[in-house]
Image: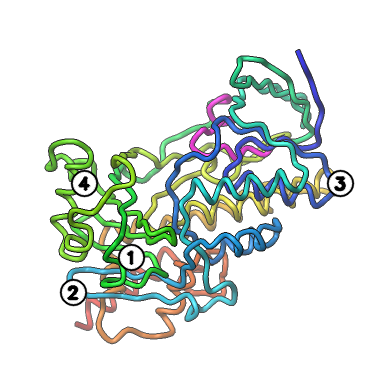
Amino acid sequence: MKSESVDVLVIGAGPAGSVAAAIVKKYGLNVKMVEKLKFPRFVIGESLLPRSMEAFEDAGFLPALKASGFQEKFGAKFVQGEKICDFNFSDQFTKGWSWTWQVPREDFDLLLADEVQRMGIPLEFETTVTDIKFDGTDSVTTVVDKNGKAQQINAKFIIDASGYGRVIPQLFNLDKPSNLPPRKTLFTHILDTKRQEYDEPNRIIIIDHAPSVWIWVIPFSNGFTSVGFVGDINFFEQFEGTPEERLRKAISTNKHISQRFKDATYRFEPRTIEGWSKTTDKFFGDGFVLTGNVTEFLDPIFSSGVTLAVSSSQLAAHLVAKQLTGKEVDWQKEYTDKMIFGVDTFRTYVMAWYDGTLQKIFFAENQNGEIKSKICSVLAGYVWDTDNYYVKKHQTGIKTLASFIQNTK
């Protein structure tokens, strides 16, 4: 069996894997990537957050991304009936990026994968990890290509950025259920010929449609707009027919989008994803670290997925390089504790959306500008800024605020 040796093996070629590989490469380390699927491939997570720009900049991707023509995103608009709450990232409390992009992920992920290969990083697509054996921090990973040919990769460290594939958690039984209830989404890309008559294309629109049900509207620069319903699984049972018929019926029930997308052309048959929330027992071990959705995927409501993915990969890549260049790393303190804090901050806001707490804040009259700017920072992905009260005290802060608003009506 063919065998090769590298310093770092990166599993997965999505944004998390590409960011990790590019940063490790900057340290002069020998890095290799393997990816189970063939690119381009479809995945959701199409509306980025400004915090992710720090990782893309660190990895050296910004020039290529800026030249790509992706739709620039400057904020998020929340809609509840006739009420609107508009967040502009330029008004956020935390100093940082005030814009990002909305992207068809098949194009976005392929661009990043092309960039890492341009940097000289070998990337093998359609290559599946079948086994990993650890000897201390050293490892031997067996992979099989699309033709069934196996090879072994000896590595000093593995970064698992396999996303929903969850390679190491599945191989070593590390998965555990999330504390979030199961939800479902039905979505497609729609040819948006009426865009100019409605919302600006430079922000995501999130519509509070019904209890525990919301809609995303994400315009792209290619003329298509991603539209999806997310909610309790039983919500979707009222719509019968083919996936397209069901989505058209769902769209017809919402005043904000029914005319805009009535009779519009769908790019592909609507798709369904459900039961996506998963977590794991540990974020690292001897010779490996988990990044991105391999650690935990929460919910699409605040577009946190890619930001948590690339932020964790950015941090992990620097720590891996630090360890491999002979320095001490406290993985619990420097990685796990930090990432859990960010995940838990987003988790608080996700749960507060579904229980109606955030709607009381977002759609309140006479909003306080300073408070709104701090919440805007969370929505921009700056969930580690403990100078922000609504980050530092995320669990109690928004509950207290919502209660105050309710009592002063």
Q: Residues within 10 Å of mark 1 (few under 14, many from 20)?
A: many
The percent coordinates of residue 354 (x first, y second) are: 28, 56
Q: Mark 2 is on which residue type?
A: Glu
Q: Nearer the viewer, mark 3 or mark 2?
A: 2
Q: Mark 1 is on which residue type?
A: Ile
What residue is disc 3 on? 325
Q: How much space separates mark 1 and mark 3, taking CA atoms?
A: 45 Å
Q: Are marks 4 and 1 in contact (CB under 8 Å)?
A: no
Q: Is residue 90 left or right of residue 83?
A: right
Q: Nearer the viewer, residue 191 or 219?
A: 191
Give, as a single range, the part of the protein colored magenta.
159-172
Label whose residue precedes the other's in the sequence (3 or 2): 2
Q: Nearer the viewer, mark 1 or mark 3?
A: 1
Question: Residue 205: which disc?
Answer: 1
Q: Residues within 10 Å of mark 2 (few under 14, many from 20)?
A: few
Helix, strand or loop at disc 1? strand
Helix, strand or loop at disc 3? loop
